[in-house]
Amino acid sequence: MRSDNGPWPRLLVVALIPGLVVLAARAWVVEPVIVSSDSMVPTISTGAVVLLYKPAAASGRIRNGVVVAFTSPLDGHTAIKRVIAGEGQTVAIRDSELYVDDVAVPEPFVDHSRIDGTYFGPVKVPAGRVFVLGDNRGVSIDSRDFGAVPLTAIQGTLLTGQK
């Protein structure tokens, strides 16, 4: 005896598959994140929605200059900052100018006139960590405050807002 339930089982499968694909992509590939601070202005505005690319974090190879999201060591929330230096590199700020391994790093996204007279370091980035800074240095709470971020805390790189 054959039971015919009509088109419902097939429609259910057809409706569920796209939803499962979207959920899987969000869990393992790309996730939207709302920016809740002004520490990356002017690159990324407060309230902007950016896309977080997760496979980049899994690789463990994050290059300097990339904007990343990570779990903040201060409160456990997601923070967004720019990677300035990787393990073994030395970071210093002299009169608002960034130096990595004693070489000045051009930063067209930073308003140096607002942070004139800022000094920091030098500090060497420990193994398995990256040094992060906000582009809006005057208000950013970053590696100058909480130290270098473990690579294991990196959630992903931003697909938008890169300079």
Image: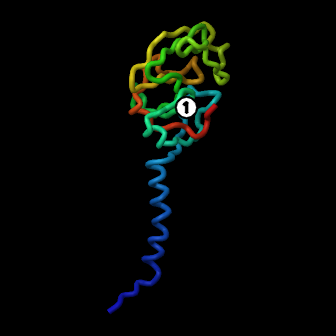
Residue in the picture at 46% in, 76% down: 10
Q: Position of residue 108 (x, y in %)?
A: 67, 22
What is the quadrant of the C terminus in the image?
top right
Q: Position of residue 138 (x, y in %)?
A: 58, 17
Q: Classify residue 116 as left or right of residue 119.
A: right
Spot occupied by residue 66 in the image (x, y as percentages of width and height): 55, 31
Determine whether the residue tagged by mark 1 lies in a helix, strand or loop: strand
Residue at image location 48% in from the left, 61% down from the top = 19
Q: How many marks?
A: 1
Q: Which residue is mark 1?
A: 67
Q: Quadrant of the N terminus?
A: bottom left
Residue 54 is situated, as x and y percent measured from the top left of the image, at 47, 42
Residue located 49% across and 32% down the image:
62
The kind of residue on which mark 1 rests is Val
Q: Is residue 102 above or below residue 49?
A: above
Lateral position of residue 37 relative to residue 76, left or right: right
Judged from this view, the residue extending furthest toward the left is 1
